[in-house]
Image (tube, rainbow, N blue to C red):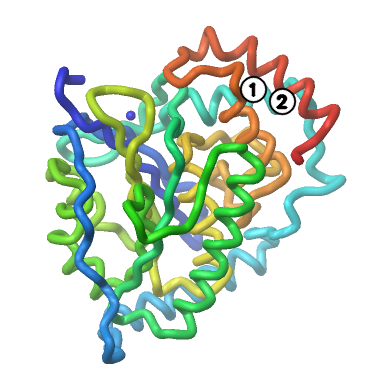
Amino acid sequence: MGKALGLAALLTLAACEVAGPNAPRQATMPEQRPIGLVPPAPLASPIPVTPSAASRALSVYFQRLQNDLMARGLLRTDGGGPDTTFTDTVLARNFVRIALFDEFVMTPTGLRAQPTISRLRRWEEPVKFTVQYGATIPEDQRVEDSQNIRNYVSRLARVSGQPMSMTDTDPNFHVLILNEDDRLGFEGELRALVPGIDNASVGAFLNVPRDTLCLVLAFSQDGNPQYSQAVALIRGEHPDLMRLACIHEELAQGLGLANDSPQARPSIFNDDEEFGLLTTHDELLLKMLYDDRLQTGMAAAEAAPIARIIATELMNTGPS
């Protein structure tokens, strides 16, 4: 993130603590059995469901966390400016660290920090997003989030050049906006979305620590570096900006920008939480990731010199 028959799952986590937002976000999962697409059971309920006391307490906690981050000048939404300049050399270096490395691995006892070189992973087929809501997500939030996701998918498609759309017909990238009550009862739906998913991946989805804000599982078949399906979990208890920040990070990481780097700036692919929304720097990373001169499965040593050429060109033209 190998067996002859397997489903490789890349798990990326967005984690943050009030005292210091530097918790791990990314890990590699072991391979499982080949997947098939099975229509999920509908999550929405025609009758509004009141969140539990535990879910309401999380809403209070995350609102305080957002307030704290913003008071410290974090979760910026400006995309970068004169205080965050970078060169083509820096851009190429950041691309290698973010697109061609894993920062954490999944072990039987949980996440372990272990920087690991990887291959270039991305989608070769059109990415078809759908968004599903837990029964406790209110209607006004659903309307807001659906529009934000639709706008963001359009932006990701334009920037990367990779075909992407919002559709309920054979989707392969499921964005799940769930409160605590919804998520804890979601095992059956998750296993239906990803037949053959292993227990470690299911456990990572169901047993989410409070300081893990969101996550994405991106899957490929038989050790192939081409992604074929992804599932993103966005906590419904987040206030608006933090929820949007999770959408921005997890959807982009599920496209192949899987790692974080403390040197990446301005970027959402950095544990410092300075930027909440996709930046101009990150748009360039996406353009690089889906440039035809790079090939899915390339090793870092092979991709790095090509990335330097692309970065130099992009710094002269900028994202389109």
Picture layout, residue 95 above or below residue 175 = above
Please tell me which residue lies in front, 170 or 7: 170
The residue sitting at the front extreme is 169
Picture layout, residue 2 above or below residue 197 = above
- The quadrant of the rendering that contains the N terminus is top left
Please tell me which residue lies in front, 162 or 132: 162
**Residue at (36, 27) in percent of width and height:** 114
Callout 2: SS: helix
Label for residue 212? none
Q: Position of residue 89 (x, y in %)?
A: 74, 20
Callout 1: SS: helix
Q: Position of residue 132 (x, y in %)?
A: 35, 67
**Residue at (59, 13) in percent of width and height:** 304
Left or right of 31? Residue 266 is: right
As shown in the figure, which amino acid type bears the numbered disc 1? Arg
- The quadrant of the rendering that contains the C terminus is top right
The image quadrant of residue 73 is bottom right
Q: Position of residue 200 (x, y in %)?
A: 17, 43
For marks 2 and 1, give the CA distance: 5 Å
**Residue at (40, 40) in percent of width and height:** 26
As shown in the figure, which amino acid type bears the numbered disc 2? Val
Q: Position of residue 248 (x, y in %)?
A: 55, 54
* Disc 1 packing (10 Å; few <14; some 14–19; many ≥20): some
**Residue at (50, 17) in percent of width and height:** 295
Q: How many numbered discs?
A: 2
Left or right of 290? Residue 30 is: left
The image quadrant of residue 169 is bottom left
What residue is pinned by disc 2?
90
Q: Are marks 2 and 1 in contact (CB under 8 Å)?
A: yes
Label for residue 93? 1
Picture layout, residue 244 above or below residue 3 = below
* Disc 2 packing (10 Å; few <14; some 14–19; many ≥20): some
